Amino acid sequence: MNYSQILSEIQNANLSMDELRNLNSVIVSMSKNKRRVSNQVKKFSLSVGQTVSVDHQDCVGQTYTVQKINRTKSVLRDSKGRLLNVPISMITVG
């Protein structure tokens, strides 16, 4: 089943509020799990001293050096020596 088929089935179904809440919680938990796995993969590809960039409009064209890797964020140092706390999901390797 693809996205459009699932969407049309949900729209055509006569679901109660409890069923809709349950469906929503399942979708949210699946989304969080995919994001968590993606961040873990990215986290394991990072290492201290590695040069990275940040996916943010204020940081376009700048490179940073990884100083520390925490559970959800990483400490990066820019070329001027300033430290920046960045979520791992916003870090681009390479």
Image (cartoon, rainbow, N blue to C red):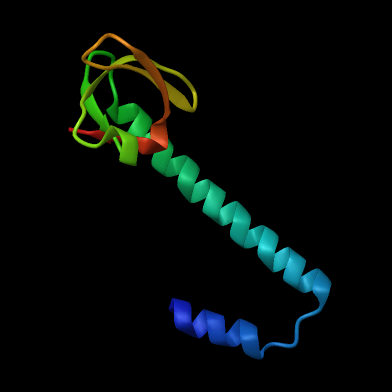
Q: Answer with the quarter of the image where residue 73 lies.
A: top left
- Which of the pair 52/45 is nearer the observer? 52
* Residue visible at 46% across and 19% down in the picture: 70
- Image coordinates for residue 63, horizontal then vertical, percent: 20, 25
- Image coordinates for residue 89, horizontal then vertical, percent: 40, 38
Q: How many marks?
A: 0
- Image coordinates for residue 49, horizontal then vertical, percent: 23, 13
* Residue visible at 40% across and 31% down in the picture: 88
- Image coordinates for residue 83, horizontal then vertical, percent: 36, 13
Q: Is residue 18 left or right of residue 75?
A: right
Q: Quadrant of the C terminus?
A: top left
* Residue visible at 49% across and 23% down in the picture: 71
Q: Quadrant of the N terminus?
A: bottom left
Examine the rendered structure and indicate whether residue 42 appears above or below residue 47. Answer: below
Q: Answer with the quarter of the image where residue 44 lies.
A: top left
Asked if one can make out residue 15 in the rendered structure from this viewpoint, the answer is yes
Examine the rendered structure and indicate whether residue 61 appears above or below residue 35. Answer: above
Q: Answer with the quarter of the image where residue 16 lies.
A: bottom right
Residue at the farthest top position = 81
Q: Is residue 23 left or right of residue 75?
A: right
Asked if one can make out residue 56 in the rendered structure from this viewpoint, the answer is no
Residue at the farthest bottom position = 12
- Which of the pair 46/51 is nearer the observer? 51
Examine the rendered structure and indicate whether residue 57 appears above or below residue 83. Answer: below
* Residue visible at 40% across and 43% down in the picture: 38
- Which of the pair 61/91 is nearer the observer? 61
Q: Is residue 77 left or right of residue 29?
A: left
